Image (spheres, grey):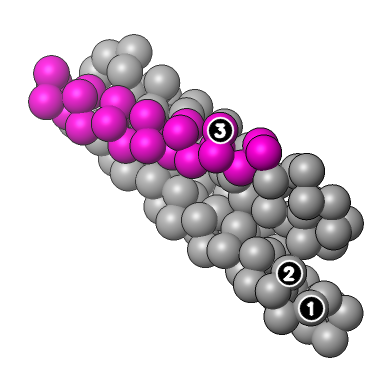
Amino acid sequence: MDRVFFILGAVSAALGVAAGAFGAHALRGRLTPDLLNVFETGVRYHLIHALGLFSVAWAATRWQGHALSAAGWLFLLGTVLFSGSLYALSVSGVRALGVITPLGGIAFIAGWITLAWAVWQG
């Protein structure tokens, strides 16, 4: 499990850096400042939760349990829902995509709580 989440963390971090570079170079000047800020928020949470995946991988080297795996999958789900919806909203301008974003935020919060629980139980 530690290898899986380490790899997912590395891939997620690479995608987050690529998204940040895309926003900084390809979208600046094409998006309104408000929508560029939305995109950058997606990048910020994407990168933070790539580190969260690394923390799950590290924790898996010390403790066992299904809760650790659940935490990692919640971080990944949160990245797709939260950051993905913000990326899509900012480049499309479709504000309705914003209703998905809180679901990703809930997944992030649940992931951190689940990670804490897994380590506590470990």
Q: Residue at x 22, y 23 (%)?
A: 118
Mark 1 — residue?
Answer: 32
Outermost residue on the bottom side: it is: 29
Residue 80 seen in the current view: no
- Closer to the chain start, of discs 3 and 1, is 1
Task: Specify which label sits upstream in the sequence, 2 or 3.
Answer: 2
Relative image position of residue 106 (x, y in whole percent): 46, 33
Q: Are marks 1 and 2 in contact (CB under 8 Å)?
A: yes
| Residue 91: assigned label | none
User: What residue is rendered at 78% in x and 51% in y?
Assistant: 95
Residue type indicated by callout 3: Leu
Between the residue at mark 2 and the residue at mark 3, the CA separation in whole angstroms equals 20 Å
**Quadrant position of the C terminus in the picture:** top left
Nearer to me, 117 or 107: 107
Residue 16 can be seen in this image: yes
Please tell me whether residue 42 belongs to the stretch shown in magenta: no
Element on which disc 1 rests = loop
Image quarter hosting the N terminus: top left
Q: Which residues are magenta?
A: 99-122
Decide: is 84 above or below 1: below
Q: Which residue is mark 3?
A: 103
At x 78%, y 43%, the residue is: 96
Q: Which residue is mark 2?
A: 35
Q: Residue at x 49, y 27 (%)?
A: 73
Above/below status of 121 relative to 83: above
